[in-house]
Image (cartoon, rainbow, N blue to C red):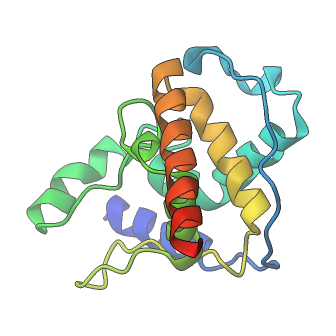
């Protein structure tokens, strides 16, 4: 029963955001070790806004510490034959994707063929700049090697897109 109420709350929260869309350049930040990011130490406005938006739009499903689906709901999800909500910390796979793909995923959402546990589209609630701020925030949970890999993936995507348009 508790899991049902958590799901209802989750679906209610993700359906509430409103905002504008747009694009802007990514803001460079200095990274710190993933385990050294207590809430009280964030002073960069991009990270503060990224944390706020993550907690508002992402944390209730992906975990407020980025650890993924809450353990109490995992077995029920697996029993339904469904995939788990992925972690965004260093144990997950978010860092394996370029910014461009992650932005598209957040803007368009992920539709589940069973119409359960889908990720809603946030294209009308978050700007690309706000989405990138969320990525900057969650990247603090990654290792330095993961951040570097993700940066290379993003650059490679840009290079491929430029080659296609030339």
**Residue 126 at x, y = what percent?**
73, 69
Comparing 28 with 53, the one in front is 28
Residue that appears at 57% across and 46% down: 155
In this picture, residue 155 sits left or right of residue 87 = right
In this picture, residue 146 sits left or right of residue 26 = left
**Residue 39 at x, y = what percent?**
74, 27
Q: Which residue lies furthest to the front in this view?
A: 166
Comparing 156 with 121, the one in front is 156
**Residue 123 at x, y = what percent?**
66, 78
Q: Can residue 9 be seen in this view?
A: no
Q: So how many labels did they put on this image? A: 0
Residue that appears at 53% across and 64% down: 163
Q: Is residue 147 above or below residue 118?
A: above
Q: Is residue 152 above or below residue 156?
A: above
Instruction: Give the quarter of the figure containing the C terminus.
Output: bottom right
Q: Can residue 68 be seen in this view?
A: yes
Residue that appears at 45% across and 40% down: 95
Instruction: Give the quarter of the figure containing the N terminus.
Output: bottom left
Comparing 59 with 45, the one in front is 45
Q: Is residue 91 above or below residue 95?
A: above
**Residue 29 at x, y = what percent?**
78, 31
Q: Is residue 150 above or below residue 23?
A: above
Which quadrant would residue 31 be assigned to in this image? top right
Residue that appears at 34% across and 61% down: 3
């Amino acid at each position: 029963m508790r899991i049902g109420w958590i799901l209802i709350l989750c679906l209610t929260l993700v359906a509430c955001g409103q905002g504008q869309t747009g694009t802007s350049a990514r803001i460079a930040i200095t990274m710190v070790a993933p385990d050294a990011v207590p809430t009280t130490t964030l002073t960069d406005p991009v990270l503060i806004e990224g944390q706020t938006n993550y907690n508002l739009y992402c944390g209730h499903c992906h975990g407020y510490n980025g650890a993924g689906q809450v353990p109490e709901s995992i077995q029920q999800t697996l029993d339904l034959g469904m995939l788990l909500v992925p972690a965004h910390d260093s144990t997950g796979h978010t860092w394996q994707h370029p910014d461009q793909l992650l932005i598209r995923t957040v803007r368009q959402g992920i539709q589940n063929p069973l119409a359960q546990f889908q990720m809603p589209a946030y294209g009308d609630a978050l700007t690309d700049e706000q989405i990138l701020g969320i990525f900057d925030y969650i990247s603090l949970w990654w290792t330095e090697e993961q951040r570097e890999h993700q940066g290379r993936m993003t650059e490679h995507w840009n290079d491929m897109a430029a080659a296609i348009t030339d």
